[in-house]
Amino acid sequence: MKTTFANSTKWLLAASMTAVMTLGSGCAVMREQETVGSYVTDSTLTARVKASMVEDKTVDAAAISVETLNGVVQLSGFAKTSAEKSQAERLALKVSGVKSVLNSIAVR
């Protein structure tokens, strides 16, 4: 009898944790009012933009943040020159699927 109760408790705990994790990740999507599909697409675009910056040695990828919402990429952070700021924007625009770029990078 204890074994059955222990197994039921473990199953209930596992089911509860799964529900919390599923609903918790859904809240992040709902907050931004995106579908799960567009959230995944935006995450992929962010990763591709960041990867293109890492590959380009004229851009300090560590100093620039990339966020994407519905295909619109926002760049923020710091660049050493206006040329670096412009290059970061050009790299983001070259990524397939990017609709537009908001360049909020500060030059310092």
Image: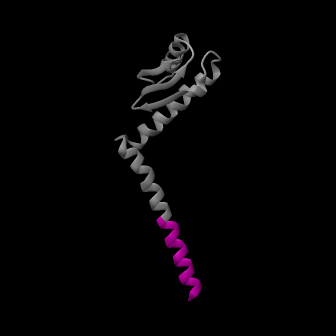
Magenta segment: 1-16
Q: Residue furthest bottom?
A: 1
Looking at the image, which is closer to me, 56 or 37?
A: 56
Residue 31: x %, y % from top left: 36, 44
Q: Is residue 79 above or below residue 37?
A: above
Locate residue 1: give its quadrant: bottom right
Left or right: residue 23 versus residue 94 is left
Q: Residue at x 47, y 66 (%)?
A: 16
Left or right: residue 31 versus residue 89 is left
Secondary structure mainly formed by the magenta segment: helix
Total labels drawn: 0
Locate residue 98: give its quadrant: top left
Residue 87: x %, y % from top left: 54, 14
Q: Residue furthest left?
A: 33
Q: Residue at x 52, y 11 (%)?
A: 82
Asked if residue 28 is among those painted magenta in the image, a careful observer would answer: no
Looking at the image, which is closer to me, 9 or 96?
A: 9
Q: Is residue 36 above or below residue 81?
A: below
Coloration of the structure image: one colour
Residue 3: x %, y % from top left: 59, 84
Q: Is residue 33 above or below residue 45?
A: below
Looking at the image, which is closer to me, 54 or 2?
A: 54
Residue 71: x %, y % from top left: 42, 28
Locate residue 64: give its quadrant: top right
Asked if residue 10 is among those painted magenta in the image, a careful observer would answer: yes
Q: Residue furthest front?
A: 108
Q: Residue at x 56, y 14 (%)?
A: 84
Looking at the image, which is closer to me, 23 or 108?
A: 108
